[in-house]
Amino acid sequence: MMSRDLRSMPHGIEIYADIAIVGGGPAGIAIARELADTRIRVLVIESGGSDYEAEIQTLNSVENIGQPSVSPNAVPEGRGYSGRLAWLNDVPAFELRNRMLGGSSHTWIGKCAAFDDVDFRSRPWLPLSGWPIERSQLLPALDRAAKLLNLGPNRYDESLFALLHSTPDDLGLDRRLLRPFFWQFSHMRNQRAVPTRFGRLALDITATNIDFLTHATVTRINIDSHGRSVTSLDLKSAAGRGASVHANTIVLCGGGIENARLLLASNSVLPAGIGNGYDVVGRYLCDHPRTSLCRFTGRDIDPIAQHFNFYGLSHAGRTQFYLRGLSLSPEIQAQEGLTNCAAYPVQIYAQDDPWVALWRLTKGTSKTFKGDLLAVAKSADMVTSGLYNRLVRKRGLPHRSTELRFDVMAEQQLNAESRITLTERRDKFGQPLPRINWKIGTREIDSVKRLALVISDEFARVGLAKPKLPDWIAGGESDAPVFMDMAHPSCATRMGTDPRTSVVDINAMVHGTEGLFIAGSSVFPTPGHANPTLMLLALSIRLADHLKQRHAATQSHRLHVSEPDLSLQQG
């Protein structure tokens, strides 16, 4: 692997490759890894470098005219199972994008799950629902994505029970209403406390056919005069250096917002932008509306935490832990016309929680050494039982907490007016900023509310503590719901068979534009309720397989042409 920095290269340089990948985040790195050690010459183009740079981050500016990205009343995810703050109340989640090698993996906590079977189905009550590929077709790629993320088996429903070291108790909840749902957490192979960082995975690529070009922002995608095939990319660096990349195949991996922005801004041949003959690019923008469903305090916390916690299993020589939550059953979704949604537990640890105190002591971050030492000493029984729970039963640790709540992420119904367009404002390279008009509909609000009420009623019915519901759920229609987005933008360049309602085909190539492909959550046909990383990696791996086949077929018809390389020529 060779890494170049555009800032130090001659202005006007021309670069040649077989495949150019725009974006060095999880999707781009996954595709590059799959293409490593082949005869395909690959160039990964990254707008930033290997570290955070404030100047580069300003290129992520957006104009938000839709739903608030972060509500001033929203509660951050907080300390709990994640062990860190996932959100900052003064930072809009749409801004939590990272222009650097590794992309969004620098700010995630590793939370992973695959989409449900129901997510792939056509549901009459949800317009444009259904994927053009079946879930079964993605299973091999899902397993490869799980291996890349150091995950356990891809089981996220009750089929997981049979694999767990100790089976969760049957609480007697009505399966016609609620179903168990699980999440895994991805970590670096040799650092269990560190979520998988794709910037480090990029550094692990040693294949000579993969090169990286950093500090190179793509400002335009160029197509032929007929608008039928991709030809090249225009690049700029913060230092004012320009360059062009010539490739037969270009893959946009810029993220849920930037992929659409690039297509719209590349309008020199097609005034509406590339792939936008039916005004679809940027439409159907989805995210995962998130809010707190219900809360438990005091003595009610421990009995709930006993059941909704981490459960482990042995896989590939290590213990993998899954977090147990709850989702609306497919039956109730169909009967009441609801979207898919699932709730997961979040514990807020007390200041004198022995495990948090022990963690601070071992990391050398304790500000009250004696206080933390006393917290551990006074909780010897909890520490002993916790070690037994963790090491023998493969369960989560018991904690002293001030609150346990269930937060929810909901699937959104597709809405053509929830979209990305371009503004008149320009960034430092003269490119129009994206205008975000994200809309939350009544159907997802009703789905979240229904899930909260079902959990409350079912817990009371089976003898568990009844939770406290937020006012907007318990108080009636007059109370406004409080939501925030999860920085999971998706569907704005969605996959489908009809160009009137989609941007890419089932192989992720832009309709009508030969050689231009898109990877990432922007190609999701529907957003599901689960965190997107595992699914977008599976689709990226599937795309890499297609690109290998496509390149082989292309080369067989070009026997008289020498293999392209990454040689540099000054223009």
Image (tube, rainbow, N blue to C red):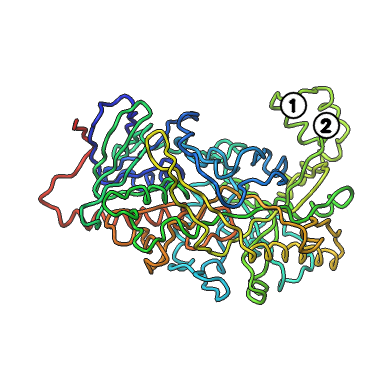
Which residue type does callout 2 highlight?
A: Val
Give x and y (percent) for residue 447.
67, 65
Task: Please tell me which residue is depicted at 37% across the width and 35% down the height of the picture.
Answer: 429
Label 1's element? helix
Task: Please give left or right for residue 265 compared with residue 95 in the image.
Answer: left
How far apart marks 2 and 1 lie (CA) works out to: 10 Å
Task: Please tell me which residue is depicted at 31% across the width and 48% down the height of the picture.
Answer: 250
Towards the viewer: 461 or 90? 90
Residue where numbered disc 1 is placed:
361
Q: Quadrant of the N terminus?
A: top left
Q: Which mark, by number, is residue 531?
A: none
Q: Looking at the image, is 414 positioned above or below residue 243?
A: below
Query: In the image as oriented, which residue stretches furthest toward the left?
Result: 560
| Dot 2 alpha-carbon crowd within 10 angstroms: few under 14, some 14 to 19, many 20 or more | many
Residue 391 in sight from this viewpoint: no
Towards the viewer: 435 or 257? 435
Residue 476 in sight from this viewpoint: yes
Label 2–label 1 contact, CB within 8 A: yes
Which residue type does callout 1 highlight?
A: Leu
Towards the viewer: 392 or 98? 98
Q: Quadrant of the C terminus?
A: top left
Give x and y (percent) for residue 515.
28, 54
Residue 188: name its quadrant.
top right
Disc on the earlier residue, 2 or 1: 1
Residue where numbered disc 2 is placed:
376
Task: Please tell me which residue is depicted at 49% across the width and 39% down the height of the picture.
Answer: 61
Residue 175: name its quadrant.
bottom right
Q: Looking at the image, is 555 positioned above or below residue 137?
A: above
| Dot 1 alpha-carbon crowd within 10 angstroms: few under 14, some 14 to 19, many 20 or more | some
Task: Please give left or right for residue 429 compared with residue 441 in the image.
Answer: left
